[in-house]
Amino acid sequence: MKLYYHPASTTSRPLMLFAAEQRIPLEMQLVDLFTGEHYQAPFEAVNPNRLVPVLEDGAFRLTESSAILKYLADKIDSPLYPKELQARARVNERMDWVNTQLCRDFAYGAVYPQIFPLHKRRSDEAQSAQLQWGCERAQAWLKVLDQHILGAQNPYLCGAQMTIADYFASAFVALAEIIGSDLAAYPQLRAWLGRMKALPSWAAVNQMIDGYAASLKGQAMVAV
């Protein structure tokens, strides 16, 4: 299997982490987002969306991170993606929630406009309005994640056991640190992220994005 990826890609890192932790042999094909390789014809032929990640398994191709993570888990028959109907439905629900709520408002609404020039709004007024809106929305979703999805009773997103939903969500939640949030307002969430960061492969997988975050230190950021 071949994975087209970039370590700065929030949707690539859950796959990198899962593959590393589960020792899944993947041919890793770097797509250089910083030079615009994903907009060039060779990669556009692989994924017309011009996005990473992409998984190729022979002639079969997947272009969405959530679907790829589920596919990899099923490929190795991982208990982290349970087969019991309701348990699996809960994992799917959590991953859909990350995609449709947290990713939209937190990543694209609050974080990316501050750390990636491509996402910055065209005027200071528009940028300020975007960050105010995005951070307010993101804070609401982080509160849901902290108080209701996790709460005092759940160490992981689906209950007592780690699942692929935790892998998927962890890359998005960790974005908070790039914009200067220590997540102190969300104690359950902060503790959960600490558990994910304790995985043996976390540091290696996040080395590049951590270095990029370090290069942004000193810049004014709006935290959540």
Image (tube, helix red, strand yellow):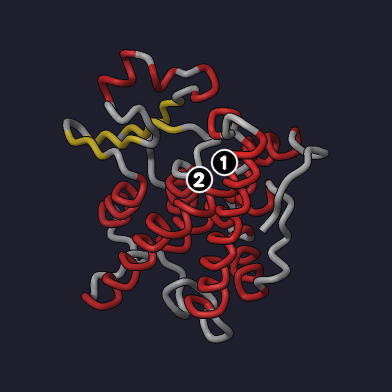
- Which type of secondary structure does the marked residue at label 2 adopt? helix
Looking at the picture, does residue 143 appear above or below residue 168?
Answer: below
Residue at far top of view: 41
Looking at the picture, does residue 47 appear above or below residue 164?
Answer: above
Q: Amino acid at mark 2?
A: Tyr
What x and y, as percent, mark residue 72?
A: 31, 50
What residue appears at the point 64 percent right and 54 percent down from the top-left corner? 176
Side of 7 relative to 72 (left or right) = right
What residue appears at the point 63 percent right and 60 percent down from the top-left corner? 198
Side of 140 relative to 55 (left or right) = right
Structural crowding at the residue carrying mark 1, measured as other residues with C-alpha within 10 Å and reported as few (<14), some (14–19) or many (≥20)? some
Q: Amino acid at mark 1?
A: Tyr
- Which type of secondary structure does the marked residue at label 1 adopt? helix
What x and y, as percent, mark residue 18?
A: 44, 51
Q: Are marks 1 and 2 in contact (CB under 8 Å)?
A: yes
Q: Which residue is mark 2?
A: 108
141 or 8: nearer the eye? Answer: 141
Residue at far bottom of view: 153
What residue appears at the point 44 percent right and 24 percent down from the top-left corner? 31
170 or 59: nearer the eye? Answer: 170
Residue at far front of view: 125
* Quadrant in the picture for the C terminus: bottom right
What residue appears at the point 18 percent right and 36 percent down from the top-left corner? 60
Residue at far left of view: 59
211 or 149: nearer the eye? Answer: 149
Looking at the picture, does residue 184 appear above or below residue 69?
Answer: below
139 or 8: nearer the eye? Answer: 139
What x and y, as percent, mark residue 9?
A: 50, 38
Q: Which residue is mark 1?
A: 112
* Quadrant in the picture for the N terminus: top left
Residues at marks 1 and 2, CA–CA distance in whole angstroms: 5 Å
Structural crowding at the residue carrying mark 2, measured as other residues with C-alpha within 10 Å and reported as few (<14), some (14–19) or many (≥20)? some
